[in-house]
Amino acid sequence: MLASDIAVSAEHDWVTETRLLINSHLDDLLTSSHPSPVNAAMRYSVLAPGKRIRPLLTLAVTDFLGGAHDAAMPVACSIEMIHCASLILDDLPCMDDDRERRSRLCTHIEYGESLTILAAVSLLTQSQCIVASHDMLAGDLRLKLIQLLCTTVGPNGLSLGQYIDLKSKGDIPNPAAIADMHQLKTGILFQAAAKAGCLVSHATPEQEDKVMRFTTNLGLAFQMLDDIKDANDDGTNIVARIGVRSARRKVQDYLQAAHAAINGEANASVLQNLAHTFFRGVTAAV
């Protein structure tokens, strides 16, 4: 398990304060000198209350590696824009056909389908523009980050994961295949968030390996927790196949593996605290 002596108040303060900074930065980035319906739909989608776990992960990795928050923040926000774009596309009638997201109406219910699609496309392009114009980063680093974001979204990333989910219509044959699909829909963006923190902080290969092992297990735990919450769904829910007790054990195993990947490293507590904040209580007795 994660270290029992983690200071709950400190971890809560870091997450709370950093989330507020992320929200403020997102607000600034989406404030336009020429407001439009597209911009309004973008703001509605992105500024809805959210956990911000992906940008928090980028910034926690930056802290872990001794990088600069000012350099990492715009990149973290660009990843959150990609995440939000994927959510509003996910919710469309031709995709998952949902009505609510983050405790309010989905963007396509509030703004209409056509405007929602334009907002999603604009968020994806805006995420690239933010990185391209980030003058605190060297040109070659900006190119690496843009390539990372494009690969994450593209035909072998989020887009493929959504296609597999839609094509299967919930009929994925086994837990391993479900896990592969979840890696493309969920895990790949976690990994991009962590990789971005590594790039901005000029991580060594050894440091990056530790961060990515931590992040892979964190992403698996996060998806498993999501499936536990939706355990009554058949479809592409692993928990529906393996049972809640087994799923809780897997969450425990993933979090232990995440902790082990960075155990003993200087500044490891910032990543451990982030994991502990989001998973506190879910590994209770199985």
Image (cartoon, rainbow, N blue to C red):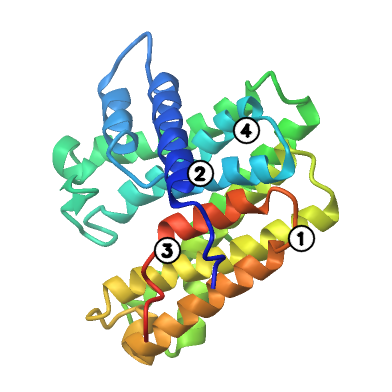
Q: Amino acid at mark 2?
A: Leu
* Residue at position x 35%, y 83% in the image: 239
Along the polypeptide, which appears first: circle 1 or circle 2? 2
CB-based contact (under 8 Å), mark 3 and mark 1: no
Q: Is residue 172 above or below residue 13?
A: below
* Residue at position x 63%, y 50% in the image: 194
- Find numbered disc 2 in the image and state the secondary structure of the residue it sits on: helix
CB-based contact (under 8 Å), mark 2 and mark 3: no
CB-based contact (under 8 Å), mark 3 and mark 4: no
CB-based contact (under 8 Å), mark 4 and mark 1: no
Task: Give coordinates of residue 276: x percent, y percent.
Answer: 48, 59
- Find numbered disc 4 in the image and state the secondary structure of the residue it sits on: helix
Q: Please indicate whether residue 230 sits to the left or right of residue 142 in the image.
A: left
Task: Give coordinates of residue 256: x percent, y percent.
Answer: 58, 74
Kindly identify which residue carries mark 1.
Answer: 209
Task: Give coordinates of residue 185: x percent, y percent.
Answer: 46, 62
Q: Quadrant of residue 122?
A: top left
Kindly identify which residue carries mark 4.
Answer: 72
- Find numbered disc 1 in the image and state the secondary structure of the residue it sits on: helix
Numbered mark located on residue 279 in the image: 3
Q: Marks 3/1: CA distance?
A: 23 Å
Along the polypeptide, which appears first: circle 2 or circle 3? 2
Numbered mark located on residue 247 in the image: none
Image quarter hosting the N terminus: bottom right
Q: Amino acid at mark 1?
A: Asp
